[in-house]
Image (cartoon, rainbow, N blue to C red):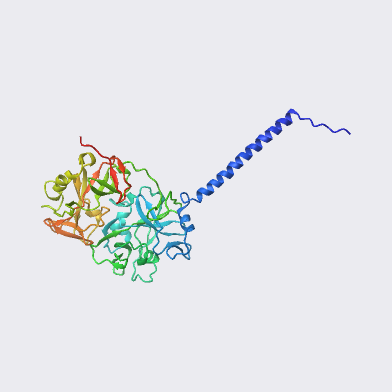
Amino acid sequence: MAKKRFKMTKEKRFQIINTIIILGIITFYFGRLIYFKKKLFIIYHNVNYSYLSTVLVDRIDYSSKDRLMENEDGTYTYVGNVNNNYISVSGNLYRIMSIDANNNIKIIAQEAITVMPLFEKDVFNNTSISHWLNKLELENTGIYEKTIKNSSFLVKNSSCICQLESFENHICNEALDLNKFGLLSLKEYLAAGGQNSYLNNGTSFWLGNRNGEGKYYLINEEGAIGISYSDSLTIGVRPVFTLSGSTTAVSGDGTKEDPFILLNSEIEKALDAPIGSYIQYAGIKWRVESIDENRNVILIMSGVIQKDGQDYAIKFGSHNYLNLKSGLGHYLNNEFINELTNYEDYLVIKKWKYGTFPYIGEYDYRASCYDNEIECYVAIPNISFKHLTGNENIYLANNGTQSDNLVCIINENLIKYINTNETANVKAVICLNGQVMITSGIGTEDNPFVLEVISNE
């Protein structure tokens, strides 16, 4: 029998060609699928894109006692003198403290952001410091919260603020701070190792708990636990807040030299400089205090006014408030300002606020800093300002009611009254045009931002 010859019809040829094309398309897209799956695998296992909590847990060094420790409830806590838990948020340096059951990350400022009293015999939520930290419906609240450029990654903080009869073996009750920003609790300090941990930074700062007599606990310069001894005690405020579990880091390895960074931002103008960063102007180092409603930059001196290399202590004047016709106000806006290069090109005249303490011990910055104002180029800070740390015997733009001759200073960690004919150091504040360009520097104390040179010709 003769073999039947296969005959390729036009229709079959068309079907075969279509099949080959379809198989080719499937093969191509399947290959691309594998490629992108591998790429996504690599990306999500890279520190730049992984959830930060995952990165922290994955790299635990179990050979060291100073590390991220896993707790019985599945949470994690940094203990001991760890050196790889640094994180930068809005330009300021923080330390990662813990990871909760929802992978939220609690952090604390490495250094005190400012110094303030904390004398109120009340739960922490109702104190001046809590109002200073958190934006509420009350007027002039949330001064610190405004420094956080992108708050979308924040969740409500949860820290123990209960009243404790003893700090030994205490158990926190249901008194919790559920605001976004708070202070370190005594329990958290002890859990990290207390005096022998990274939380001991060599400075005094407040804790969020009170003792049985209503006095707030504190940590002293040696890292020991103490109790407030005066209603006018003015020591460090180290804000604590919590990042959501979906937080990612765009760079960094957690060391002090290369901290985790959440957001990269381009810095071209003065208004781009992070709060707390350093700016060099007229041979003086300043710190960025805030950005005002007109997008200008409030600067506060890093140190105090000096002459011939020494602190220049001067009399306040004949009044207990800044006066442009005499005393400190006249000096700042006539003699001192002439030492600031081309100040008309760099600076903006501003209305500066000041107020009155009824007496030291009845302190509330919201009621004591905004009663009056003076319009000028150079002023002094009131107690609501940040970056008041590290200086002794400095004037505040606050005065007393007992006498027209009393002005306030910070000295030896206390707010005090002195007479207007006594002398104190001056920590000047100015308002820099936010559009001035930054030409160099990285904003640190050792390498501050440098402003563009503006000719006076």
- Find residue 250 and report its horizontal and vertical position in percent: 43, 48
- Find residue 205 and report its horizontal and vertical position in percent: 30, 61
Q: Nearer the viewer, residue 198 or 116?
A: 198
Q: In the rendered view, would you say 384 is above or below 80? A: above
Kindly tell me whether residue 400 is visible in this rendering. Answer: no
> Which quadrant holds the C terminus?
top left
Residue for point 47% across, 49% down: 49
Q: Quadrant of residue 165?
A: bottom left
Q: Quadrant of residue 342?
A: top left
- Does residue 285 appear to the left or right of 194 in the view shown? left
- Find residue 350 and report its horizontal and vertical position in percent: 22, 44
- Find residue 442 and report its horizontal and vertical position in percent: 33, 47
* Outermost residue, right side: 1
Please count the marks in the image.
0
- Does residue 59 appear to the left or right of 334 in the view shown? right
- Does residue 106 appear to the left or right of 387 in the view shown? right
> Which quadrant holds the N terminus?
top right
Q: Nearer the viewer, residue 47 or 350?
A: 47
Q: In the rendered view, would you say 88 is above or below 345? A: below
Kindly tell me whether residue 63 is visible in this rendering. Answer: yes
* Outermost residue, front side: 308
